[in-house]
Image (cartoon, helix red, strand yellow):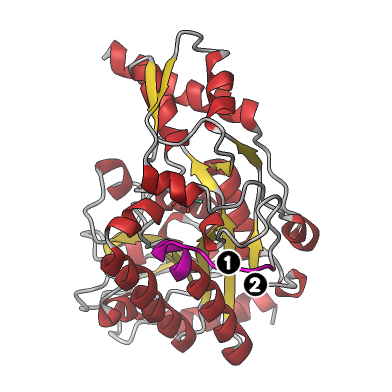
């Protein structure tokens, strides 16, 4: 009996819902009554076509932040729309709500999260919920709750259900006593922000669960991520996104970091591809479970000069914010990602010049469309 047919029968039997629903010819349907399951009128969410069954079932927490929607789009192309569930504690905007499965999920509510994982047969979790550096310093207790207690809930549920768990870390996991130029994967990590401390905690706890319980934990330390259609939320590298919006809309930009503050940065498409690549990397390739990834480093002056190649009249002023300048001065200047390049073939695509052209093209077209309407 060919493997395919045995598998189909096995899947049929495995997916035959306990509620006795008829297994349809090409897709399986299951109606359950748990309030926490993603229900939709035509229940199409649960009709998993056979081509989608042998893909991971992915839950993204903090899905409405800067990276979740883009990552969901990338993973849905690969694993099927219904196999990637975005979640957050806020209502999704129209284009997100209509792009695929979305569910309310509060990572501080252990039972809620556990029910979602069970009811939706989740096999991979991507944990994007976190307060970033600057907003964390302004809300230390909330950052501690979300970034640390929230992480503990995610770790326990991932361990209980044998999930592959991805948690992003950051350049912010390093501090003023770390080698800053370049900063290697393994070195002193004494960050001075609650965000940084919580991310070092996440790295260590994830690796502990990996070594102790064999959890499939994977982590990338992201540089500052620059994206056109999603706003960053309360970080120290946000200026490198804001400059594009202000330059196009106002023709002027005020920078809260000193012109020579050099930081590692990356265009969002490189970040999302790196995340997919580490998620799919064969376990035997991974000599570590936490990796730096890098693309470029620049300071505000270099970014302004590159933007001025296209917007020569851009007016720029500097009004330094002590808190964020202090954070930036404690962070890496250049990132060493040689292990990621060696172990799983990581390679970035966008340098500063490509970054500026792609950002201006996207925002210009949006502005042109906006102006035209
Ligand atoms: C921040 N954008 O500035 C985030 C990030 C790499 C920096 O973690 O806080």
Q: Residue at x 59, y 91 (%)?
A: 212
Q: Check whether the beta carbons of the residues at disc 2 and disc 1 lie within 8 A of each other.
A: yes
Marks 2 and 1, how far apart at CA: 6 Å
- Disc 2 marks which residue? 289
**Residue 50 versus residue 73 in the image, above or below:** below
Closer-to-camera residue (312/278): 312
Q: Quadrant of residue 141?
A: bottom left
**Residue 207 versus residue 317 in the image, above or below:** below
Q: Is residue 193 magenta?
A: yes
Range covered by the magenta-colored residues: 187-198
- Disc 1 marks which residue? 219
Q: Residue at x 50, y 78 (%)?
A: 163
Quadrant where the C terminus is found in the figure: top left
Residue located farthest toward the bottom when viewing the structure as drawn: 212
Q: Residue at x 64, y 74 (%)?
A: 4
User: Measured from the top left, where is residue 162 in percent x and y?
Assistant: 51, 84
Quadrant where the N terminus is found in the figure: bottom right
Residue located farthest toward the top when viewing the structure as drawn: 313
């Amino acid at each position: 009996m060919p493997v395919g047919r045995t598998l189909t029968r096995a899947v049929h039997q495995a997916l035959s819902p306990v509620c006795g629903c008829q297994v349809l010819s090409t897709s399986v349907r299951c109606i359950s009554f748990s309030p926490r399951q993603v229900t939709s009128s035509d229940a199409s969410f649960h009709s998993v076509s056979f081509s989608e069954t042998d893909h991971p079932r992915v839950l993204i927490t903090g899905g409405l932040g800067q990276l979740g929607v883009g990552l969901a789009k990338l993973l849905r192309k690969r694993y099927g729309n219904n196999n990637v569930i975005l979640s957050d504690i806020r209502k999704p905007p129209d284009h997100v709500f209509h792009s695929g499965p979305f569910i309310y999920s509060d990572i501080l509510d252990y039972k809620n999260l556990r029910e979602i994982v069970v009811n939706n047969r989740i096999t991979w979790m991507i944990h994007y919920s976190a307060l970033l550096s600057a907003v964390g310093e302004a809300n230390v207790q909330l950052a501690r709750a979300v970034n640390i207690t929230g992480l503990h809930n995610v770790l326990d549920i991932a361990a209980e259900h044998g999930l592959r768990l991805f948690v992003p870390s950051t350049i912010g996991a390093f501090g003023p006593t770390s080698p800053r130029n370049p900063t290697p994967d393994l070195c002193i990590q004494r960050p001075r922000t609650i965000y940084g401390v919580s991310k070092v905690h996440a790295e260590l706890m994830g690796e502990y669960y990996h070594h102790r319980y064999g959890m499939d934990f994977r982590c990338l330390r992201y540089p500052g991520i620059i994206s056109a259609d999603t706003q960053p939320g309360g970080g120290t590298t946000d200026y490198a996104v804001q400059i594009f919006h202000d330059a196009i809309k106002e023709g002027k930009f005020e920078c809260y970091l000193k012109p020579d503050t050099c930081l590692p940065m990356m265009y969002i498409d490189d970040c999302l591809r790196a995340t997919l690549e580490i998620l799919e990397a064969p376990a035997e390739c991974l000599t570590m479970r936490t990796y730096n990834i890098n693309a470029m480093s620049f300071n505000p002056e270099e970014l302004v000069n590159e933007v001025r190649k296209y917007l020569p009249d851009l007016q720029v002023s500097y009004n330094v914010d002590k808190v964020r300048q202090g954070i930036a001065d404690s962070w890496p200047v250049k990132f060493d990602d040689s292990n990621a390049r060696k172990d799983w073939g990581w390679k970035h695509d966008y340098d500063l010049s490509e970054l500026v052209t792609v950002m201006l093209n996207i925002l210009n077209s949006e502005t042109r469309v906006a102006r035209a309407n």
